[in-house]
Image (cartoon, rainbow, N blue to C red):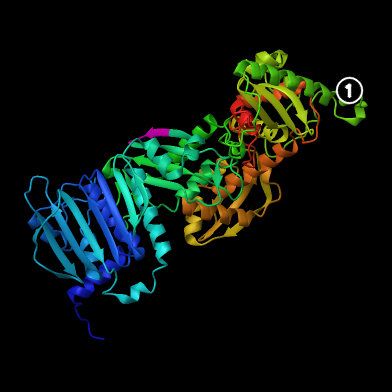
Amino acid sequence: MAIRRLPETLINRIAAGEVVERPASVVKELVENALDAGAGEVETIFRDGGRSLIEVRDDGCGMTREDLALAVERHATSKLDDDSLVRIITLGFRGEALASIAAVARLAIISRRQEADTAWEIRVEAGRKEEPRPAARAPGTTVSVRDLFFATPARLKFLRSARAETMEAARVLRRLALAHPDVAFRFVTEARAVFSLAPGTEEARIAAILGRAFLDNAFAFAAEREGYSVRGWGSLPTFSRGQPDQQYLFVNGRPVTDRQLSGLVRAAYSDVLEKGRHPSVVLHIACAPELVDVNVHPAKREVRFRQPALVRSLIINALREAIAREGQRTAMPVRGMVPAGDDNKLPHQEKPAAGAAFADRLSQEAARLSLAAQAPLMDLPPQGRHSAGLAESKTAFAGVADVSAPDLSPAGLDAGADAGAAETGAEAAENHPLGAALAQVHGTYIIAQTQDGIVIVDQHAAHERIVLERLKRERAAGGISRQGLLIPEVVELDADSADAVLAHAEMLADLGLVVEPFGPGAVLVREVPAALGHCDVAGLVRDVAADLIAHDLPQALQERLEHVLATFACHHSVRAGRFLTREEMDALLREMERTPRSGQCNHGRPTWVKLTLADLERLFKRA
């Protein structure tokens, strides 16, 4: 078959296939151009799912007649000062976007410089360019794309419904809006404004896009090392979603999609997140331009860092430290059940008492109910319930050297617990975040009074987290116990997997998995973590290899070890249905206040919820 040179129009359409995948791709390229032009306001008009019209208007610096003629040529850009691709500080730089769009649609651009007397317009239809002509417009640029893919009608068959394409364009705009909170964004479809975002603070923009509930149940995090900085917002583990659709990653202000992000976030939230749930995260990474390569994807969706392992560890550690710091907080799902207004307030209802008087009345009533609830327990024979102390027989834990079930008595929970237990209810409510224990309900839930409301604690979930955190500290102090295999096992792997496992052999040994090379495409396993018992060694090594290739982290091994610790903690914690004395309940509350991540159990469920006096008053229509 003879070789021939392709015509220029076909070359442009092939190139367009890499950049213009769907209408949302056009929105991304045009809005990024507007942001690079210094726009303070960007309006996007979207009709028929982007098929009939995509129009982006901005108040940026604009273009001259000469710039306009060059802007629609391939590989023409104003965003590179020289021929180097090392220091890229703009969102766009390839010079392909407008030429690619013009190759498959009808493109019109009207632009005016701030200092110019007139605007200029240029039109390009399926790659055929007209000469620029004078036009009327305020300073800035308007780019109109009509009849997308009319020059390549086969592409139209692969577009989704107008609604689906509109939703995807909205997602693209929201990502850009999160990265640039100082810019106003407006998105209009047909005659309806989908959203209009005013410029403001980062917190205000996050609240507008992710919702105020996210900010109310989120924590800030930040870390910096060796030229890279990480900062952002993460949701509390108990404020999670069924899909990872609210995880946003930005690198030097550029929205990117990194397939490893979900894995890194999952690693950071390990042992605090409910299975099948995903946290919401807004993550900003900043570094010098030469430390990141943004030229690895035609649509600029991916980046490559010069030190990827450093960046990954920085993200995980920053999130983990923040989770531990904020771990005593928990999302408040009960709040959504509390009425917000007083439209249905009953007539002749007594007005709520002042805060102090209401608290006193609540304290008196709760004390009365507490005594009534505890009275039947006094008459039970010793065998009818557990003894007052929480001490249990200590069971050796094979996975941690010399670690046994911790003392569960009030004194054994931690030093200083007795002091807290000795305080009166009023003093504890005044001095401690989780208040003073008043009663136990159904042998499962502890009711405590705080200065401004009541707290309800799941005793098993709370103590489960306390035991797990203690086991983790002891494991870190004493190392992971390993057990040698009587007959070392040879695991056959593909070449890449074997190389990944052997390259991280030292790190795996620290986790209890000792491997050695055993010829091409194979490793020899001599020792495994004792906590795993009789495990599928080959399956474990293959899972670890897959994680190392995908994330450069042995997540499978970490998760198995953490699962063993969590299971042990679950089986050696205060069970639901176990009656506790007032001193025992107070000791548990004090220990919760000292324990990292105590806002959620090992399975990611909340350990406590709170109702303020205002919530209670709304529930009873007193407010």
Q: Is residue 14 visible?
A: yes
Residue 14 colored in magenta in the image: no
Q: Amino acid at mark 1?
A: Met
What's the magenta bit mostly, secondary-structure-wise? strand
Q: Which residues are magenta?
A: 222-227
Q: Is residue 416 visible?
A: no
Residue, x 53% and y 54% (percent of image)?
A: 545
The single residue placed furthest to the left in the displayed view is 117
Task: Reply above or below: 78 against 390.
Answer: below
Relative depth, front residue between 479 and 445: 445
The picture places residue 421, in percent across and down from the top left corner, at: 71, 17
Figure check: 602 above or below 70: above
Farthest-out residue, front: 348
Q: Is residue 43 left or right of residue 336?
A: left
Q: Secondary structure at mark 1?
A: helix
Left of 74 or right of it: where is 472?
right
Instruction: Residue at 74%, 21% (x, y): give it.
Output: 365
Residue depicted at x 78% and y 24%: 369
The residue that mark 1 highlights is: 378
Residue at 20% in and 55% down: 142
For the residue pair 216 and 95, the one nearer the viewer reads as 216
Residue 56: x, y in percent?
A: 25, 55
Relative to 492, is 326 above or below?
above
Quadrant in the picture for the C terminus: top right
Task: Assess disc 1: are there few (<14), some (14-19) or many (≥20) residues with their C-alpha within 10 Å of its C-alpha.
Answer: few
Front-most of residues 618 and 363: 618
Position of residue 436 measured from the top left corner of the image (x, y, whole percent): 68, 20
